Amino acid sequence: MNAAKRILDDLLAGNQRFVSGTQHHPHCDVDYRKELGKGQNPRAVVITCSDSRTPPEIIFDQGLGDLFVIRTAGLCVDHIAIGSIEYAVEHLKVPLIVVMGHESCGAVNAAITGGAPTVHLESIIKFITPAVQKAQKEGLDKPEDVVRLNTANIVAHLKETEPILSNKVQDATVSIVGCHYNLESGVVELL
Ligand SMILES: [Zn+2]
């Protein structure tokens, strides 16, 4: 089993603990915090929404130093976000990138309904719009379908982002996986 698969299984096991209320709350004690002052060695990059209901450390029952997290509304990955991901895989040698969309995403709903967004919100809507269009084309009309398509689009985009991510995916030193978080059950499902 490669490193990325092992880490993914561990995150999913942490999610099961979260779902059943049997969390370990690892890596939160004073000694561990002091130890981490010497440097970080996170195991996974997690890209998820800024939504207050989707903190990945809690959802995957992880602690300090475990996850390198990028959060924006609707999981929009711009150049700055991609630079952050590249830093994690290139300099911190993180082998796994998890892209996690979620149920009832306000950013996705805004992209579906349109309206008159502000200049900066417009950038978010623009980013999500290809998923809205794809859903329309495929006859999918649920917001959750758009969330899943948006997540899939981001996974595909990252896999093709040159040169660092595309090379690392090709030589199998980095895995990129998409998943979907269910707000009420707490379950993370792989896409
Ligand atoms: Zn959201």
Image (tube, rainbow, N blue to C red):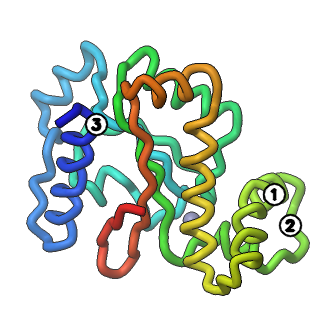
- Looking at the rendered image, the quarter that the N terminus falls into is top left
- Circle 3: element type: helix
Residue sitting at 16 percent across and 57 percent down?
A: 13
Q: Amino acid at mark 2?
A: Pro
Residue sitting at 44 percent across and 42 percent down?
A: 176
In the image, residue 104 sits, relative to residue 35, either above or below, namely: below
Q: Which residue is mark 3?
A: 4
Q: Which mark is residue 126?
A: 1
Q: Is mark 3 within 8 Å of ligand 1?
A: no
For marks 2 and 1, the one nearer the N-term is 2
In the image, residue 60 sits, relative to residue 185, either above or below, namely: above
Q: Is disc 1 surrounded by few (<14), some (14 to 19) or many (20+) residues within 10 Å? A: few
Q: Nearer the viewer, mark 3 or mark 1?
A: 3
For marks 3 and 1, the one nearer the N-term is 3
Q: Position of residue 149 (x, y in %)?
A: 60, 65
- Circle 2: element type: loop
